[in-house]
Image: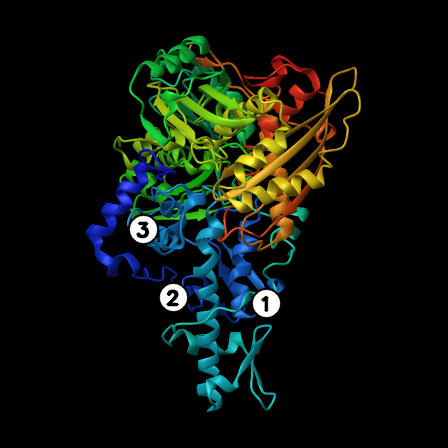
Amino acid sequence: MSRIGKIARRTFLFGAVAVTGGAAFGYYKMVETPPNPLAPDTGAALNAYVIIDATGITIVAPRAEMGQGVQTTLAALVAEELDVTLDQITVIHGPPAKAYFNQALLGNAIPVIEYQRKPWVHDAAEFVGNAAKFLNLQVTGGSTSTRDAYVKMREAGAQARQMLIEAAAKRLNVAANSLRTEAGTVIATDGTTIAYTDLATDAAALPARNVTLRDRSDWKILGTSQPRTDMVAKSTGTATYGVDVRLPDMRFATVKMNPKRSGMRGFDASEALLMEGVEKIIDLGDGVAVVATNTWLAMQAADAITFDWEDATYPADTEAQFAIIEQAFNSEPNSTARNEGDVESVPAAITAEYRVPFLAHATMEPMTTTALFTGSALELWSPNQGPILVRDWCAKAVGLEPEQVTVHTTLMGGGFGRRGEYDFAVLAARVAREMPDTPVQVTWSREEDMRHDFYRPAAIARLSGTVQDGKAVLLSADIAAPSCSHQAMQRWLGRSMGGPDTELVAGVYDQPYAIPNYRVRGYKADLDVPVGFWRSVGASYGGFFFDSFIDEMAHAAGRDPLEFRLELITPEHAPSAKVLETVRDMSNWNSPLPSGVGRGVAFTYSFGTPVAQVIEVRDTGRGIKIENVWIACDPGVALDPHNIKAQMMGGCIYGLSAAIHGEITHTDGEVDQFNFPDYDGLRMASCPQIEVNVLENALHISGVGEPGTPPAAPALANALFSLTKQRPRSLPLWRDYIFV
């Protein structure tokens, strides 16, 4: 039976380009290895991922490190096959380069629901993903970093090791297969040892060979929890984030932009220019940049400027914006992503409408980039998730070619998708152009950051369902929201791309439930509020809609909510059923609930990873306390179990923070929230105890950065229903509940 309506995953927009790219470039170009981007002066670059010189071994981990530990895990992939320990290496991000394209990000465009993919479909997805090199998709996002790197970075390590062995064999005049390696040395049968650092120059002159990767049973590093390679630097305050960059004769700047996301008729900066240390006010068209001798002074001066702003182009208040979203249901669906059975033939017995607000990314480190413009070159130090995007758009902004732009990707204090945009880097480049030969660090205030985000879309869901004899026989879901995919493609590629966007219905159409009549339709709302990719994207609200309604159906059927889900999931996807069974046992689900305690379960399959969560809440008399969370997940291969657990915990807390506190609202065209007092998160005192169990039953490795987020909101909402018998159908929850 067909499991898709029109197309699948993130999304037709990438998918169409990928498929046509394969036809246009041909098989050879699709599988051809891009050139090594590492400059000769970086040492002996054995390939795009391994540099060895007299100072030691450097591994390029070309995905943004924003707290998720990805550079440690990617380095471990290389180190495992190179036969070195993590304390023997240095890890860097590396330059913007086609060699570091994200194959997995584009491979997800294959129009088959992910949990249903046969091995040949999985292989086809990997092939199609090669088109990412032609789109310059060096992007950290979509929970794809380890999926993308799992084979190719191990191969890079294995090829480098083989080249070093061959170089040693030539030097010792022995057969290569008589040599072995250990801890960064090649060892001969007579005990002679040669360090990799002594062989690297000779090895770099040799061709790369086809290699056989180590069997998992022989892994020494992978599969075990490893200390983070950035742990010491972060613990001692020596790690360099974007705001930590310091260069000789640097100036500091901030921006003040139209809070209504429109143009500027004029401004008066006379008072700001009188402040000692303020050097320049730069007209940006929709705001200004203030350049000064320090960031605090620049921000004070920016606050002293008066502006004449143009009005917003979108509806001015939240109520009017939701009216536009609601109107989308009157149009034709943008997608029918799943359409099984005959939904119209079964009367709907249960109906519900759910709503969620816009959300900010709220990274701890505000947007920042340091730029140095010399007239013929631009150098950037930028915490970003897409260095080629940053390079190319900054080049365009200052009238240079991409080859004239150098991008250094720093550590970043959170990303969550926000730093996949390039607007903050472009503004820094434009400011630097007005201050030639002077490095300028442009740092946004928290208020500018919060009010000029690309928000997680607000959304409305209308669901209907039927249960018969305790079983689900109908589920129909219609979801309306602005399209973050369409907006992002317009920004990134500079042109609009039409077609269905199933990210609108992620977390709903792609769930492993055996429901005989199962239809999911997405409706694109034409709303100009800027939206973008937010941790777990459409699944962040789709998981809340779908799983909350599944819970409603379970209670309508008089069934245990977990067993109801398990019965529907077991025939569809065994690994998903196993995570539910595991979380049932972890939480002692079948034990009686004490008075004043509620317990809720939720399950979401996203980014290839099934995740089940059980949340337990208690009425303290002063408010509701989230006491315990149990999480079971299955990423296929647990490369670093401790880091996976940390990501599941972090994803859950991010989801709970958004569910309880998160919302972006508008009044008179301006965002009402300014800073963390207006946009709170879960504090340490309110955080529950969290236990995580990592399984490895899935066929393929999958992501962990985002899948912990979608089940958090519905698990909490279902626990609140268990406690109060009132069903939460809108977020944030602080409007209806008091939490302590």
Q: Position of residue 100 (x, y in %)?
A: 39, 54
Circle 3 sits on which residue?
Answer: 128
Q: Quadrant of the N terminus?
A: top left
Q: Amino acid at mark 1?
A: Ser
Camera-side residue of 730 and 699? 699
Q: Which residue in the rendered view is the most extreme toward the front?
A: 469
CA separation in Å, label 3 and label 2: 32 Å
Relative to 418, say whether 352 is above or below. Answer: above
Q: Looking at the image, can residue 244 be seen?
A: no
Sequence-wise, the earlier of marks 1 and 2 is 2
Q: Are marks 1 and 2 in contact (CB under 8 Å)?
A: no
Q: Earlier in the sequence, mark 1 or mark 3?
A: 3
Q: What kind of element bears circle 3? A: helix
In the figure, is residue 604 to the left or right of 632?
left
Is tag 3's residue or tag 2's residue first in the polypeptide sequence? 2
Q: Is residue 388 above or below residue 524?
A: below
Disc 2: CA contacts within 10 A as few (<14), some (14-19) or many (>=20): few
Give the residue pinned by disc 1.
217
Assess whether mark 3 and mark 1 are in contact (beta carbons under 8 angstroms): no
- 174 left or right, relative to 336: right
